[in-house]
């Protein structure tokens, strides 16, 4: 995954063949903000501009710019996988929630 970071905010970067430019989408915002550039330097500049505008609009309207998460989500998996996850969690004397949470934390830390 192509990620660019500016001032603690991250954006997913993809190539848009129709425009022959790179497109960035700022992640974790309480709304949508994207930007375009044809090289990394220009992309970073446009990222900063787009972020500044988004943050300014949020401040003017009294909106928290960052998306809030509850810490809960539903996950649907095949029954066979559910069984294997339960076995592994039990073998490590953990709840399924504890075990999956640790696996996910490890996965996103790399």
Image (cartoon, helix red, strand yellow):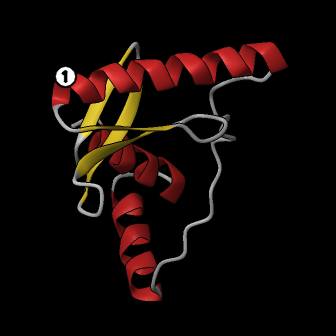
Residue 22 seen in the current view: yes
In the image, residue 11 above or below residue 72: above
Residue at 53% x, 16% y: name it.
52
Q: Residue at x 24, y 25 (%)?
A: 42
Q: Quadrant of the C terminus?
A: top left
Q: Give percent across and percent down for residue 1.
A: 23, 49
Question: Can residue 62 be seen by looking at this rendering?
Answer: no
The image quadrant that residue 49 belongs to is top left
Image position of 8 with respect to 91: above or below = above
Relative to 79, is 29 on the left or the right? right
Q: Between 27 and 81, which is closer to the camera in this rendering?
A: 27
Residue for badge 1: 41
Helix, strand or loop at mark 1 = helix
Return the residue found at the far front.
19
Residue 61: name its quadrant.
top right
Q: Position of residue 11 (x, y in %)?
A: 38, 36
Instruction: Tell whether 17 sits left or right of 62.
Output: left
Nearest the viewer among 78 and 57 is 57
Q: Position of residue 19 (x, y in %)?
A: 29, 56
10 Å crowding of disc 1: few (<14), some (14-19), many (20+): few
Q: Where in the figure is residue 26, as x and y percent of width and height?
A: 46, 36
Residue drawn at x 42%, y 52% as measured from the top left: 99
What is the total number of numbered labels drawn onto the structure image? Answer: 1
> Of 109 and 10, which appears nearest the observer?
10
- Quarter assignment of residue 108: top left
Q: Is residue 109 left or right of residue 57?
A: left
Relative height, residue 64 to residue 33 (above, below)? above
């Amino acid at each position: 995954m192509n990620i660019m970071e500016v001032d603690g905010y991250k954006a997913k970067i993809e190539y848009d063949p129709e425009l022959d430019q790179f497109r960035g989408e700022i992640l974790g915002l309480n709304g949508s903000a994207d930007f375009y550039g044809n090289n990394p330097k220009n992309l970073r500049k446009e990222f900063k501009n787009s972020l500044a505008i988004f943050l300014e609009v949020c401040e003017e309207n009294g909106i928290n710019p960052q998306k809030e998460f509850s810490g809960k989500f539903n996950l649907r998996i095949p029954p066979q996988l559910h069984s294997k996850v339960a076995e592994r969690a039990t073998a490590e004397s953990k709840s399924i929630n504890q075990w999956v949470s640790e696996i996910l934390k490890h996965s996103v830390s790399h």
